[in-house]
Amino acid sequence: MKTKPDLSFWKLWNLSFGFFGVQIAYALQSANISRIFATLGADPHNLSYFWILPPLMGIIVQPIIGSLSDKTWCRFGRRLPYLILGALVSVIVMCLLPNAGSFGLTISSAMIFGFIALMFLDTSINMAMQPFKMLVGDQVNEKQKGLAYSIQSFLCNAGSLVGYLAPIIFTAIGISNIAPKGQVPDSVTYAFYVGAAILILCVIYTFATVREMPPKEYAEFHGFEANDNKKEEKKESMFSLLVNAPKVFWTVGLVQFFCWCAFMYMWTYTNGAIADTVWGTTDTSSAAYQEAGNWVGVLFAVQAVGSVIWATIIPRFKSYKMAYFVSLVLGGIGFISTMFIHDQYLLFASYLLIGCAWAAMLALPFTILTNSISGKNMGTYLGLFNGTICLPQIIAASVGGLLLSLVGGTQVNMLVLAGVLLILGAASVFIIKETSAEKSNN
């Protein structure tokens, strides 16, 4: 098997640059979906149902795109065609979604339009996101993968900051942050427009600067013949691998369940929670509610900064499990503290702590898992492990309205519940048995 050559820094940069634009779109969605649907007239008890779509699309689309692109070879490459198609659809939908209440539709019709637009946005973002992960695996040698994924992580966080902060920046330069009842403010609408423009420009840049390996060259660098994959699929199915997954797969998956349920409730209820506790309003048509909506973007940006800072501290822990435990406990404290804080700036401390949990969730589960399974089925297990991210979110979104009723209908209580879930996740860390013994079996 031939060894992939080292790539220059800028070639590594080009591989992931489009991810900057994709992440802006994802951040705009994460910070503003509840705000948009609440503004259209959605009852807070129904907000979580709209959040079923993102993980549902992820669990469906990402494996399909991975499988299809494995079998795709054309003059434009194998991953890049799906990247450009996903980006084009995202741009169209990003221009439509924030206008759901501006087409003269009834409230119910605007909700349906917004729901369909969100479905297409989730699908296209997942279609555009997945190729970036695969491009690094395809093009980069083992020695440089750490640097390549570090670049991708930097661009991911940078894109998140732009997406989270865009509405408040537009408000600061004089674009209206209020709108007639049932319509989304221009500050949010323009943020989606600009985000769409940046997304397509970044993706076009990657599309124009990256050359994928042709089939013969790809096979030489990855040590297989054209029919090898089909032969391997016949030997061991994905279902049988899941049934025989090592214990660490399931124990880390239990921690993942609590963590991703918690963050689903953060994305769903932060807007309504801080509008109530800091701005003292639950009126979605008020200027105060929209100001709170802008501040959610700032808080999520603070969370991203906290994540970056804490990511530099995690390697200093002697044990991955202790790092995981401490990170989740800090995040749990951050969520619970939002109930007692009524100053918008003091909330920075809460979301910095929440960023600690986010940093651990992005890195430690995959580190523990990959250290405990063999390389033979590594890719399949990582694909299956994506279900431990998506399924908890789907479950959490499905029961969110019921839980909101049980906690008194106050949205900040759902953030407290998120904190409790993270602490339960931290307690579950001690069930994990870090080992390499399973390698001989998988």
Image (spheres, helix red, strand yellow):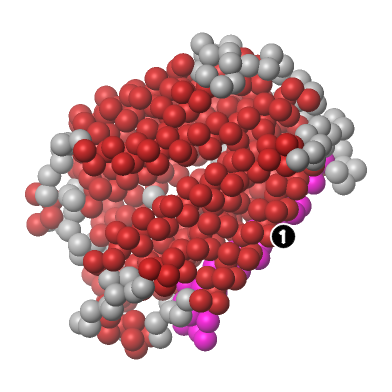
When the figure is inspected, residue 44 is found, relative to residue 197, above or below; the finding is above
Number of other residues with Cα within 10 Å of mark 1, as a class: few under 14, some 14 to 19, many 20 or more: some
Q: Nearer the viewer, residue 166 or 370?
A: 166
When the figure is inspected, residue 193 is found, relative to residue 322, above or below; the finding is below
Whether the magenta-drawn stretch holds residue 83 is answered as: yes
Q: Give residue 5's position: percent from left, percent from top.
A: 28, 78
When the figure is inspected, residue 115 is found, relative to residue 138, above or below; the finding is above
Q: Secondary structure under badge 1?
A: helix
Residue at 60% in and 36% down: 297
Q: Residue 41's quadrant in the figure?
A: top right
Q: Give residue 308's position: percent from left, percent from top.
A: 40, 41
Amino acid found under the numbered disc labelled 1: Ile
Instruction: Specify whether 328 is left or right of 13.
Output: left
When the figure is inspected, residue 113 is found, relative to residue 395, above or below; the finding is below
Q: Nearer the viewer, residue 408 or 341?
A: 341
Quarter placement of the N terminus: bottom left
Q: Which residue is mark 1?
A: 92
Residue segment shown in magenta: 72-101
